[in-house]
Amino acid sequence: MEAFPFAAAAGETASAALVLSKAAWKLGNSLSNLSRDTQLVDPEMENVANDVKVLGTECDVLYTELEKAKRSHETRSIPAANIDYDHKRLWNCLTVDIDEAGRSLQELEMLMRRMKDEEARSGFYVQDQSLIDRSKTQIASIRTQIRRNADQLRTLSLTVNM
């Protein structure tokens, strides 16, 4: 049976979580600025911004836990045979969940880009309530995805060092 490359997997996954965290924080701040600059908009954009920032926080926590697990593994002598199927499944789940969260952020970024393009074509401002109202269903759907992504990463963060 091939040994599971625990340290390498932890390092790669931690790096992916860090990249996702930076993207989430950047997008969350952009959305907060949009919400702050908007006078007519309902609080939904600020709620989305906050949820994106929560996702960024969960990525930061996951990164910290993965780095702790990696250091712990490097300082202990755990036989490769003890890193069992469940650990491999955990890493697969982490990879899938980080990828899904990244796709959710990309979907939100694309929506914001489309809204800005529409703004340029129509002469309306993104801050105009009508542009946001037309995207409300999609915004709510993406917000739900982002909240689910944050919950999944939070749960997996708790299991990393078990």
Image: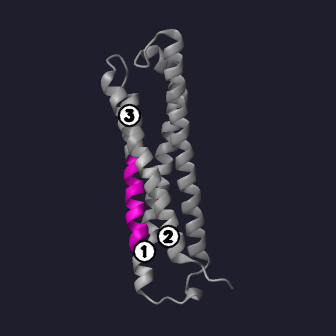
Q: Quadrant of residue 23?
A: top left
Whether residue 13 is visible here, answered yes or no, is yes
Image mark for residue 22: none
N-terminal of the pair, mark 2 or mark 3, is 2
Residue at point 55% right, 68% down?
90
State which mark lies toward you, 1 or 3: 3
Q: Is residue 89 left or right of residue 162?
A: right
Label 2 sits on residue: 10
Q: Picture coordinates of residue 95 (x, y %)?
A: 57, 60
N-terminal of the pair, mark 1 or mark 3, is 3
Q: How far is disc 1 from disc 3 in space, using C-alphas?
A: 33 Å
Label 1 sits on residue: 69
- Tell me which amino acid carries mark 2: Ala
- Is the C-beta separation of discs 2 and 3 under 8 Å? no
Kindly report the secondary structure that dominates the magenta region of the rendered protein.
helix
Label 3 sits on residue: 30
Q: How far is disc 2 from disc 3 in space, using C-alphas?
A: 30 Å
- Is the C-beta separation of discs 1 and 2 under 8 Å? yes
**Magenta span:** 54-69
- Secondary structure of the residue carrying numbered label 2: helix
Density class for disc 3 (Cα within 10 Å; few <14, some 14-19, many ≥20) is: few
- Tell me which amino acid carries mark 1: Ala
Residue at point 40% right, 54% down?
58
